[in-house]
Amino acid sequence: MAHLNPLEKEFLIRQFKLNGRIKLSDFCTLNNVSDAAFRKWLKQYEEGGLEGLARADAEIREVLPEGIDRTEEAYKREILRLRIENERQKKSYAVQMNEAGEQEYVRLREKSSK
């Protein structure tokens, strides 16, 4: 069985909960997961959601540098920042430094006149 990341574990948990008629052991067999591991993931997920799965994941735990704010607000701010960055890239903006050393957003190509 390959190592599953927290998002993959969450996906399986949601699939299991959506299908209320399947036995846990049958679900685990179909998804090539041990019953014990899946029960542990369920407990971690119920106690801490996706963050609970990530905290318990030895391979993920060390990815976040020391001192990172793990609060829900911090995650929301980071998601918003990434969405804005993504939209700027879709609209062909680039970030550059101006003469004053400040960041500014510059269009890579002119707007279409269509």
Image (cartoon, rainbow, N blue to C red):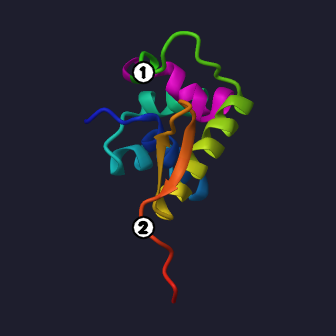
For label 1, the residue is 63
Tag 2–tag 1 contact (CB < 8 Å): no
What is the span of residues highlighted in magenta in the rendered image? 45-59
Q: Residue furthest bottom?
A: 114
Residue nearest the observer in this picture, 79 or 44: 79
In percent of the image, x 31 and y 32: which residue is there?
3
* Residue 96 screen position, x and y as percent: 46, 42
Q: Residue furthest top?
A: 66
Indicate yes or no whether the magenta region holds residue 81: no
Say the numbered circle drawn on residue 104: none
Principal SS element in the magenta part? Answer: helix
Image-based side of 88 in relation to 30, left or right: right
* Residue 44 screen position, x and y as percent: 58, 26
Q: Secondary structure at mark 1?
A: loop
Image-based side of 63 in relation to 100, left or right: left
- The N terminus appears in which quarter of the rendering? top left
First in residue order: circle 2 vs circle 1: 1
Q: Is residue 70 above or below residue 91?
A: above
Badge 1 amino acid:
Val
Between disc 2 and disc 1, the foreground one is 2
In percent of the image, x 40 and y 17: which residue is there?
58
Residue nearest the observer in this picture, 3 or 15: 3
Q: Is residue 11 above or below residue 34?
A: below
Label 1 neighbour load within 10 Å: few <14, some 14-19, many 20+? few
Any part of residue 8 in sight: yes
Label 2 neighbour load within 10 Å: few <14, some 14-19, many 20+? few
Q: Is residue 69 above or below residue 92?
A: above
Badge 2 amino acid:
Arg
Q: Residue furthest left?
A: 1
In percent of the image, x 52 and y 85: which residue is there?
113
Q: Residue furthest front?
A: 99
